[in-house]
Amino acid sequence: MAGPTLKPESLAAQALGWIDEATRAISPPIHTSSTYLRDPDNKYRSGRVYARADNPAFDQAEQLIARLEQGSHAALFASGMAAATAVFQALAPGDHVLAPKVMYWSLRNWLMNFATHWGLQVELIDMTDPAAVQTAVRPGKTKLVWVETPANPLWTVTDIAATAQIAHAAGALLAVDSTVASPVLTRPIEHGADIVMHAGTKYLNGHSDLIAGVLVTARDDDFWKRVKTVRAQLGGTLGSFEAWLLQRGMRTLYLRVRQASASAQRIAEHFAQHPRVEAVLYPGLPGAPGHAVAARQMTGGFGGMLSLRTKGGETAAIAVAAHTQLWKRATSLGGTESLIEHRASVEGAGTPAPPDLLRLSVGIEDCGDLIDDLEQALRAALP
């Protein structure tokens, strides 16, 4: 295990410095067994019973992400949705929860359909306004406040520390979807969060070849035990090979996120006053709503995600995406390759995404090439 004085970049690059004692391998083996041998006296001294909850393939990735987030423990899940919904399923029917109006669309749909039918009282609010949070929270009744920052696809920013103070004063937990920031830029537990969620598919893995989710807890408390029980009983666990891929991807996390963030900042600045662009949505721009908060709680950059609102409306936006050559027209984010998509088409009715909005996930290609490709696409779509 790597020493406590090492920087997170070193911890990630060497995956905590783990070495297989049996073979001296510096890359971990892939454990595929689904079950484990019971001792002759009927006990399990290995601590392993069944791979759904006790897979040794999880150990290294979970310990690494917990360390990077400065949390107590972490748990891998089969997807970001499995991780996020496990937090809500650890609550009880009748509990009141607050969530942002602007958030990952699939989770929003789940909350407003399945979760409400199951009995949770879900209230969507403007999470970027602490006064709105203070007004909406119900002391003794609100059990969870869910934050996503920066929030997909408008990249609005929520003050984690201020929201944590409000939530805790009301007796509620604060959970933060920090997928876009990653632990490279923001560590929500340092700002008062109780739970941190990542869609591991995105920046943690970073190679568009894995579906995974991760939860990190500030404390090994009763609520965390309920979350772990949800994972074990509902079976939303990751496969052994996928856990290995996730750990492999995190070795380059700091390099990838910093490169993507630097390029996104440059792209945002380049198109901020562009004659064919109506607006650029990116928290790294000084005039962006939430920039001051982002500057306080994001260190080393503002993330690799931004959105362009093109002139000419929906038709022009779709045409711009169609004319890109280097940018790939695909859903997802956080990979090495840059992606572009017309977000309103993906989310459908009720989306907060304006019809002229293109969501950009900046990869690690040459930034000049990315800018040039967007320029030619804009010229082709808006001559």
Image (cartoon, grey):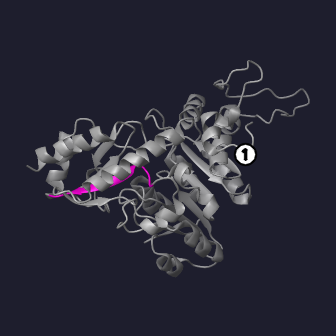
How many numbered marks have been drawn onto this rendered protein structure?
Answer: 1
Q: Which residue is pictured at 74% across the width and 54% down the height?
A: 220
Secondary structure of the residue carrying numbered label 1 = loop
Residue position for label 1: 5
The kind of residue on which mark 1 rests is Thr
Q: Position of residue 262 (x, y in %)?
A: 41, 48
**In the figure, is residue 286 to the left or right of 329?**
right
Q: Which residue is pictured at 31% across the width and 55% down the height?
A: 269
Instruction: Please tell me which residue lies in front, 188 or 117.
Output: 188
Q: Which residue lies most toward the right here?
A: 41
Q: Which residue lies most toward the left here?
A: 383
Residue extent of the magenta highlight: 302-311
Image height of 202 relative to 316, above or below: above
Q: Is the stretch drawn in magenta largely helix, strand or loop? A: strand
Q: Which residue is pictured at 15% across the width and 52% down the height?
A: 316
Residue 219 picture quarter: bottom right
Q: Position of residue 252 (x, y in %)?
A: 53, 36
Q: Is residue 306 magenta?
A: yes
Q: Which residue is pictured at 29% across the width and 40% down the height?
A: 368
